[in-house]
């Protein structure tokens, strides 16, 4: 899943969707309103990886000791 912000030209605008790489090296973006072809990599930002792994943010603490224990 990528977001492409194209500043100028025929395909100007913000396009969000699944990406496919063309033989030429440019990208096709399958958005909810249809496909946008020939988008350069320099306009694309990765939003979510499609590798089957679940990504999420958690609050992490470096403290590993229990109550009453000193942690170095």
Image (tube, rainbow, N blue to C red):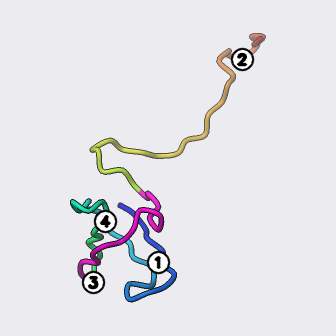
Select label 3 or label 4 by which is in front: 4
Separation of residues labelled 3 and 4 (CA atoms): 16 Å
Q: Position of residue 11 (x, y in %)?
A: 38, 84
Counting residues from the N terminus, which is met first, the one under dot 4 or under dot 2? Answer: 4
User: Which numbered tag is attached to residue 33?
Assistant: 3
The residue positioned 44% from the left and 85% from the top of the image is 12
**In terms of sequence position, does the residue under pointer 1 or pointer 2 come before the other?**
1
Q: Which residues are magenta?
A: 33-47
Dot placed on the residue nearer the N-terminal end, 4 or 1: 1
Q: Which residue is mark 4?
A: 27
Indicate the position of residue 69 as horizontal and vertical percent values.
Answer: 74, 10
Residue picked out by circle 2:
67
Cα separation, mark 4 vs mark 2, equals: 54 Å
Return the x and y of residue 27 as percentages of the image width and height. 31, 65
Give how far apart the Cα atoms at labels 1 and 2 are.
54 Å
Judge by depth and name the residue closer to the eye, 47 or 7: 7
């Amino acid at each position: 899943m990528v977001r492409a912000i194209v500043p100028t030209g025929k395909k100007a605008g913000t396009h969000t969707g699944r990406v496919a790489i063309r033989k030429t090296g440019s990208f096709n973006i399958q958005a909810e309103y249809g496909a946008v072809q020939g988008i350069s990599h320099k306009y694309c930002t990765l939003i979510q990886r499609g590798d089957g792994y679940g990504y999420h943010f958690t609050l992490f603490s470096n403290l590993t000791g229990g109550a009453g224990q000193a942690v170095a």
